[in-house]
Image (tube, rainbow, N blue to C red):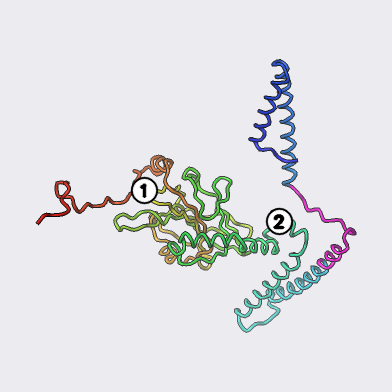
Amino acid sequence: MFLLSHRVRRTIITTSLNTLTRIYKPQELQISFLNFRQLTTVQRKKDENLSQKASVKKYKPPALGVNPAYDEALKYIYQDKAQKYEEIANIDIMIEKILNGRRNFESSEQREQELNELRKKKYDLQVLAEINDPEVRWNFKNGKIDMNIPVYRHLREKHWRKEPLYKLMQRITQMYVVPDIFPTLEPTIDLEFKFKNDVIEPGVFLFPAQTKKEPKVTLTNFHEETRLYTLIMVDPDMPDVPNNAYQTEWHWLITNIPLNVTKSDVSSGEVILPYVPPHPPKGTKYHRYTLAILEQPDNQKIIIPENMGRVKDVREFMSEHNLTLRGASFFREVWDEEVSNIYANILDVHEPQYGRRPKVDQYLDETGLKQQKYTNF
């Protein structure tokens, strides 16, 4: 079975109605058309039920004893998994001895180094123990991901670094987000954002009407411990007329956002600058609205002055608070009629309009009349 689009259904109904008018009398036609509508409604409900069932699929392992090669491969995978978990159990014992003080170290730094090495080895073994399991692979492919489990974190990060990160870096470089806003970018967090239900790809053009409400931001990170971050959204392309240059306007600022592998939203942060929708002025080129996630130093909260304005250099802000860039993305917009409504109804300010300065005609005199280009001596 397959789902029919609304356009296809409309075409089928129209065509069928035309056919019915050639076969039935008007009185019979009404009854036949009602029957036809009932049939299509029943079919549509069946299609919706099938779609819902498909969305709750569960892993069904292949039957054993059918393919000897598969049986042997599965046997080897589970033997290897059992061996890996025995090593993990031994590592847990070693970690427990260190934490309980049953091992002596020359310094606390050496103790922490030993603990970190053991924890990394344990993490690697947990990934290796599960990564070849057919059920794990099926779950990841079908979006059933538990970020608490190391193997899913590993697969999620590997997938992100393979294609989405490459596309992000390509577009950020092509559109000069680096170095216009940030000097460099080496992402460790996958920053995704949605307007309504659509995930926005880096660098795409959106309409101002689409971005009037704040986006839903998802910050997929890969560290178990909770760290604090700051989220910003800026526009580096606002005209600075007195200086004949550009200035950076801030549209959104949230600080002290706690994040870990299971906490990826910004709801727990402190909103310093409420969201202001993009409003590219008339007469300017496209604007690059950039979202970035910045890690706060030593997992400490930062305090932003209450009088912070909406025009500030991003590098200066990062330097003042010792912030480190961990992820970014952006979209673009140009002026349309909706921007005028944003200026009037949301910003409540006069809408600016920009354009090129008129060229001065060197052959005009003080009265505005054209001078002769050549003089007869």
**Of 80 and 3, the residue lying toward us:** 3
Kind of element beneath mark 2:
helix
Q: Residue furthest left?
A: 377
Q: Which residues are magenta?
A: 56-77
Q: CA distance from mark 1 to mark 2?
A: 46 Å
Few, some or many residues within 10 Å of mark 2 (<14, 14–19, 20+): few
Quarter assignment of residue 73:
bottom right
In this rendering, the answer to whether 208 lies above or below 256 is above
In this rendering, the answer to whether 372 lies above or below 91 is above
Q: Residue furthest front?
A: 376
- Quarter of the image with the C terminus is bottom left
Residue 203 image point, x, y percent: 51, 55
User: What residue is drawn where x is 81% and y is 53%?
Assistant: 60
**Of 177 and 342, the residue lying toward us:** 177
Residue 215 image point, x, y percent: 53, 49
Kind of element beneath mark 1:
loop
Please, what is the three-letter code of the amino acid marked with disc 2? Lys
Please, what is the three-letter code of the amino acid marked with disc 1? Gly
Q: Which mark is residue 141?
A: 2
Residue 320 image point, x, y percent: 42, 65
Q: Which residue is mark 1?
A: 283
Q: Is residue 158 left or right of residue 215?
A: right
60 within the magenta span:
yes
Q: Is residue 183 left or right of residue 99?
A: left
- Quarter of the image with the N terminus is top right
User: What residue is drawn where x is 84% and y is 56%?
Assistant: 62
**Of 34 and 297, the residue lying toward us:** 34
Quarter assignment of residue 7:
top right
Q: Which mark is residue 323?
A: none
Query: Who comes first in sequence, dot 1 or dot 2?
Result: 2
Q: Is residue 27 left or right of residue 264?
A: right
